[in-house]
Amino acid sequence: MANAPPQAAVALPPGITFDSIRLDTKPTASLECSQVPSSGTSKCANILVVFLNGLIAPQTFWLPVMSLILLRLKSTQGMTVNPSRPQMLAYDRYGQGRSTDRDPSDEGKEPGYGHDVLDAVHDLHQLISQVSSPADGGVPKKILFVANSIGCAMARLYAQTYPGTVAGMLLLDSIMANSDFVSLFPDPDGADFDAGSLPAGVTPAMLRETRDKFRAVFHPSVKNPEGLDRRSLAGLLPHADRPFLSQGYAGAPPHVTVVGHDPAHFAKESLEGSMATPLVISDNYTNPTWHLYNCGLVKTTSADRAVGPVIAANCGHFIQRDDPALVAGLACDLIQKLSAET
């Protein structure tokens, strides 16, 4: 919901490598990836952690999280000669971040309206099939998605499209996939509009201006630099709380941890950012609606495998940027849970 400013420089451990990968299904274009190979003999090594970007923050925003995960896992295993760690993968989608190649499937289509989120999910499945080394016994690795914004929608769609593959999801301030980001706010020009019902401090003029700004920037029809068409997203994921993801890895529902932004921090950022959204608008409309959506996401798995919504203190929409230690800790919690399961 805001532009992501530059992140602080971070010293990367040597375990993270950078690669260009061409999908077998799209051999004319490359995806830029950051990877960590698995190591050790524990069940931790049988996990593949995949980081999924939003529209704005590219894979580089995951590097501090990846580094902290490695440090945490190493510290918990003490002086182990060959500490166990999961395989990790972050990448930039076509036309995003370091992946300068465009999606080959967009050729001949209207610019900006080529591939959609489900197409990106199919590409992700192909990428995972090419980079994931089998776990012990040749069985596929457990997939753990760590996702932000529209990446959370991709994680959910992947779990639906490829049942039996996803063991866990850490959803960081998910996009409200079923929203047009304009209807969040009452229409002051609507036939049933009642100005007398507005919260204190909210005016019709304020609503009209906010709706116009959000329509110009966040509406699903607005094009983005990577050419990811969002117009079909509400139809693909019309509800926050369903479908219920009953068929995760090995037939069990996935572990799902849902994290939301700090309402006060988000409202302050929205006021001070390019949108200049009044605090009273964020407090009365954006924040409550987003929290309700996050409450729905928790219900996509069984209650005993759900955590949240966790509120990320002092974090805006880009939680992985604002508090990478929190994200790494929550990811390690999920890694520990997955390691304990057969």
Image (spheres, grey):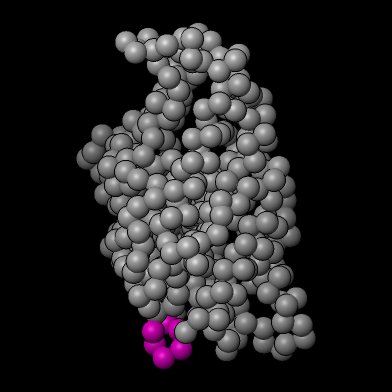
Q: Is residue 178 above or below residue 83?
A: above
Residue 226 in the image: state x and y as whole percent.
41, 42
Can residue 286 be seen in the rendering of this structure? Answer: yes
Q: Where on the picture, by quarter, is residue 4?
A: top right
Residue 248 in the figure: left or right of residue 53: left
Q: Residue at x 45, y 75 (%)?
A: 142
Q: Residue at x 67, y 87 (%)?
A: 82
Q: Where on the picture, by quarter, is residue 186?
A: top left
Q: Residue at x 46, y 13 (%)?
A: 208
Q: Is residue 116 magenta?
A: no
Q: Residue furthest left?
A: 108
Q: Residue furthest bottom?
A: 137
Q: Is residue 30 above or below residue 215?
A: below
Compare residues 123 and 184 and report the one nearer the observer: 184
Residue 201 in the figure: left or right of residue 325: left
Q: Residue at x 50, y 38 (%)?
A: 290
Compare residues 112 and 162 and report the one nearer the observer: 162
Can residue 59 be seen in the rendering of this structure? Answer: no
Q: Residue furthest front?
A: 197
Q: Which span of residues is magenta-colored?
A: 134-139
Q: Residue furthest right?
A: 79
Q: Is residue 135 magenta?
A: yes
Q: Where on the picture, by quarter, is residue 328?
A: bottom right
Compare residues 173 and 34 and report the one nearer the observer: 173
Residue 33 in the image: state x and y as whole percent.
50, 61
